[in-house]
Image (cartoon, grey):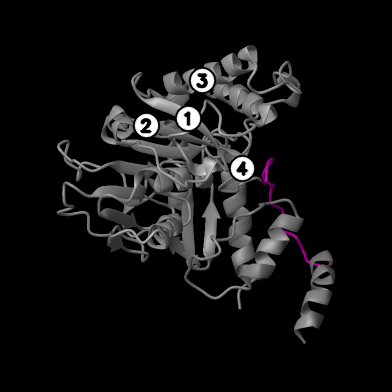
Amino acid sequence: MLGCIFYYFPIILSIMTFPDLKKPKSPNFSSGPTKKPDEWSVNDLNTSFFGRYHRSNDVKKFINDVLNKLKNILNIPKNYKVLLFPGSCSGAMEAVIWSFLGNKIVTALIFDYWGVSWYEDLLKLNLKVDLRKNLEGDLPDLNNIPKNNDIIFVWTGTSTGMTINNIDFIKSSHDGLVISDVTSAAFIEDLPWEKIDISVFSWQKALGSESQHGIIVMSPKAMERLKKRNKLPKVLSIYDHDFLVNTPSLLSISDFDLCLEIFKKKGGLKFSKKTCIKNRIILEEWAKENKFISFFCKKKKYRAFTPCFFIFKKELKHKQMFSFLGKEKIAFDIANYRKAKSGIRIWNGSNIKKNDLIALTNWLDWSFNYFRL
């Protein structure tokens, strides 16, 4: 019977009576990689370094110039070091865990599933962990973290649509390292870099740039901790980092450079945060009286600027609904993260247009009624 249902589903769609609703101009609401800026064009990419040796002086200068531009746009302190690593944010965080942790107890603050992933890595290395975990829409206990502990957390969790908001609970006199995955906060929030010793992120979220590479930002305090570790694979050794740990994609870096320029011209962090908030308000108002969905995050102050994650309040044929929305090019990739509760996850970053969000919510309202059980 199940096979028959899936066999006839395309036929069912073909005879559906569609509502007279305007579709979004762009159906790209994925939480990563995200929609590219409207101003982006492949014709604007700097192609002069394609096919070149990545350790040539002029190529190295190009990459360094891009990283310095990144520091200026994000207001990263001049005495902080910025490194490029393979494997997006995941590769960068793995390198940090292997290169820095082990001498101290690690306090792991978890409120999303990427935090769970980093915690599992700590266990694989047999590290002593002070686990603080809440996956029910609230933050874990942030009180009384021993000042000697290293701390690791995700600033904004895309899998739950939550953010830690600030790190005032960490005292300036904290001895351990403060380590944060800031992928979905970078290019949105003016982060307190002075309070974070090691930050990792990729450029595939708020910028709408291509994935592949990860960024590690290290404070002077972190650099003092960095020591040679024997038998550490080269790709995970920050100590042995020689400008580049492997061959980078100059196409990806050129795309990143272009997206940085567009971001800067549009107003940078101020523009980005303001737009995210405006877009979130649209979704907040839509969700207010909605009978089918509600925010997963219970407290508004811990809801991410983007994305918004809603869980279902009523049973829906949600797999069929997501298939329909994708087939009709209304919305791609808005289903919940695979380990999270069933729901809808919508990226509302600064590259997302207000009218597209309104159009999406109208179609979702219709879809909820059509695909209800």
The residue identified by callout 1 is 83
Of the residues tagged 1 and 4, which is closer to the observer? 1
Say above or below: 66 vs 347: above
Image quadrant in which the N terminus is located:
bottom right
Residue 39 in view: no
- The disc placed on residue 155 is none
How far apart marks 1 and 2 lie (CA) works out to 8 Å
The residue identified by callout 3 is 264
How far apart marks 4 and 3 lie (CA) works out to 23 Å
> Who comes first in sequence, dot 4 or dot 2?
2
Give the residue furthest to the front: 230
Q: Amino acid at mark 1?
A: Leu
- The disc placed on residue 356 is 4
Of the residues tagged 2 and 3, which is closer to the observer? 2
On the image, the x and y values in percent for residue 254 come to 65, 24
> Who comes first in sequence, dot 4 or dot 3?
3
On the image, the x and y values in percent for residue 345 come to 53, 55
> Is 20 within the magenta?
yes
Which residue does the image show at 48% across and 29% down from the upper left? Answer: 83
| Disc 1 + disc 2, Cβ < 8 Å | yes
Q: Amino acid at mark 4?
A: Asp
Does residue 42 appear left or right of residue 97 in this picture?
Answer: right
